[in-house]
Amino acid sequence: MTEDITLAGDGLDTEVEREISWRAGSVGLAALDPGDAELVHSWRSDPVTAHQMGIWPRSLTAVCERIERDIEDDDRDDFLILPPGGTPVGFGIATHL
């Protein structure tokens, strides 16, 4: 039964050492950076994921440019969600008002 389960990012190089910004129990958050564009692009390009999230898939270049703009935005912080083992399984955004 569990043989059919895959994680976001399967097949992508996930051996990147990341600085954990925040950890609670077994889940950690690491700041999103432009090097994560390919991973985020793969998630956003999946038709089921795009439909569930209500997003329109973008080119890899557009995703990279968006990540770079968002890093400069002092009103938001973007994070990868990391379970034990460090393979990213999703991302989240924190906005500051």
Image (spheres, rainbow, N blue to C red):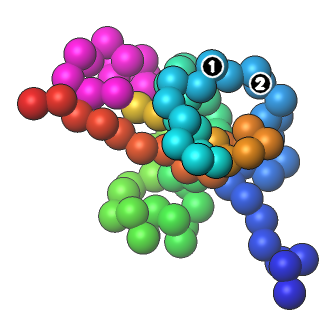
Query: What is the spatial separation of the Cα atoms under label 2 and label 1, in whole angstroms?
Result: 10 Å
The answer to whether mark 2 and mark 1 are in CB contact below 8 A is no
- Type of amino acid under label 1: Glu
Q: Is residue 51 above or below residue 38?
A: below
Residue 81 in the figure: left or right of residue 7: left
Residue 75: percent from the left, percent from the top?
A: 20, 23
Residue farthest toward the top in the current orientation of the protein: 72
User: Which mark, residue 19?
Assistant: 1
Task: Examine the residues drawn in magenta and state their main secondary structure.
Answer: helix
89 up-or-down from 41: above or below: below
- The furthest residue to the front: 25
Residue holding disc 2: 16
Residue drawn at x 51%, y 24% is 21
Q: Which residues are magenta?
A: 61-77
Magenta span contains residue 96: no
Residue at image coords 42%, 70%: 52
One can see residue 62 in this view:
no
**Labels in figure, total:** 2
Give left or right: position of 48 versus 16: left
Which image quarter: residue 67? top left
Res 17 seen here: yes
**Up-down: is 38 above or below 65?**
below
Q: Position of residue 90 (x, y in %)?
A: 55, 49
Q: Give the residue at x 55% y 36%.
A: 23
Image coordinates for residue 25, horizontal then vertical, percent: 58, 47
Marks 2, 1: nearer the viewer: 1
